[in-house]
Image (cartoon, rainbow, N blue to C red):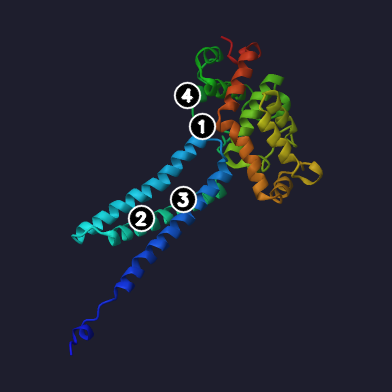
Amino acid sequence: MDTSTLDDPKPSSHSVRQGRPLRLRTGLCSYIFGLCLIWGDRFIYFGFSHPKTYLWVVLFFVGVPIASGLLVGLVIGLFRHSVHLKCLQRGFAWSFTVFGLVLVCLTMSFWVERLFRAPAVRSNGVAIVEGGDQNVQNGKTSFERLLQTANDFDLVNGTFVRIGDRYGHRIAASQYTAEERVIMLVWHSSGIIDNGGFEYLFSGDFEDDPEFRITAEAYNTAGLARGYEAFKEAFTLFPNGQIPHDSEVRIRQYRLANESVREAINTKHWKDGWEGLREKNLAQYIRQNAHKFRNLDPRE
C-alpha cells in the first residue's frame, strides 16, 4: 500500500482554486464599496459641474488598480519563477483591496475635514479669499492699475481689500455705498460659504443685515441668479421663512432641515465659484461702475 499520500497530504486542486478567488472577490468588494463611497460623496459635494474632470477621475480610479494588479501579479510570478493566472488573481486581490481601503480612508478624511474646518477669516472679521496676486491682497496696487491690468479675480479681490481698508475691515451693510455693498457682501459671504456652506454663514452675523436679505439682494444685483436662488432656498428652510436674528438660534433651526437639501443648496451656490461666474460678474460690475470706485485710491 502506498502511504505517501497519508504522510504528506496535499490540498486538492479544488481547495486551491477556492482560496485565491475568494481573496479576489473580497478585494473587489472592498474596491467597489470604496469607489461607490467616494463617488457618492463627490457627487453630493460637487454635482456634475465638471464632467470632463469626472471622466478623468473614473479612468484613474479604474485604470490604476487594474495596472497595479497586473504589475503585482507579474512580480509574484517572477518570484515564483512562473507567471500564471493564480499569480494575477493574487495581484488583483491585493491591488483592489488596497485601493478600496484608500478610497474609504480618503472619503472619511473628506468628512472629517468638512466637519472640523472653519472659515478662513481675518482677526477683524473679514473673510480671506485665498489666491491671486499678493500685492493685490495686501492693498498695494492702486485701483486704476487694477482696472487696467488685473484679471477678474484680482480686480474683485483688490477692490474688496481697498473698500475694507476704507472702513477698517468692518462688515456693516449700511456703511457702504450701493456699489461698494454689492462687492463687499457678495465677496465676503461667498468666502464664508465656500469654506463651509450656509451653515457657516448662518453661524455668524452681518451687522445691519441680521436676516442676510440685503446680502442676497446683492447677488441679484451682480447678476448671480444661481447664488441668489440658493439664498432664497436657504431662507425657506427656516420655520415660516422667518430668520432669527440670534445666530445660535438661527444655526440651530437651520441644521434641523434635511441635510441633503442643505447640501444641494450649498452646491448650487458653489457652482458659481467653480465656473468662475462669480468673479466674472463682479469684475464686470466693477468695470461698469468704475467711476464710483475711483475714490478708493488715497489722495496724494
Q: Amino acid at mark 2?
A: Ser
Q: Which element is circle 3 on?
A: helix
Report the Cα–Cα distance between label 3 and label 2. Answer: 16 Å
Choose top left, top right, bottom left or bottom right for residue 123: top right
Assess disc 1: are there few (<14), some (14-19) or many (≥20) residues with their C-alpha within 10 Å of its C-alpha.
few
Q: Residue at x 58, y 45 (%)?
A: 44
Q: Which element is circle 1 on?
A: loop
Q: Which residue is mark 1?
A: 130
Choose top left, top right, bottom left or bottom right for residue 15: bottom left
First in sequence, mark 3 or 2: give its number.
2
Contact, mark 2 vs mark 4 (Cβ under 8 Å): no
Q: Residue furthest bottom?
A: 1
First in sequence, mark 2 or 4: give its number.
2
Q: Which element is circle 2 on?
A: helix
Contact, mark 3 vs mark 2 (Cβ under 8 Å): no
Q: Amino acid at mark 4?
A: Asp
* Res 206 seen here: no
Q: Which residue is mark 4?
A: 133
In this picture, is 106 found above or below 10? Answer: above
Q: Amino acid at mark 3?
A: Leu
Assess disc 3: are there few (<14), some (14-19) or many (≥20) residues with their C-alpha within 10 Å of its C-alpha.
some
Report the Cα–Cα distance between label 1 and label 4. Answer: 10 Å
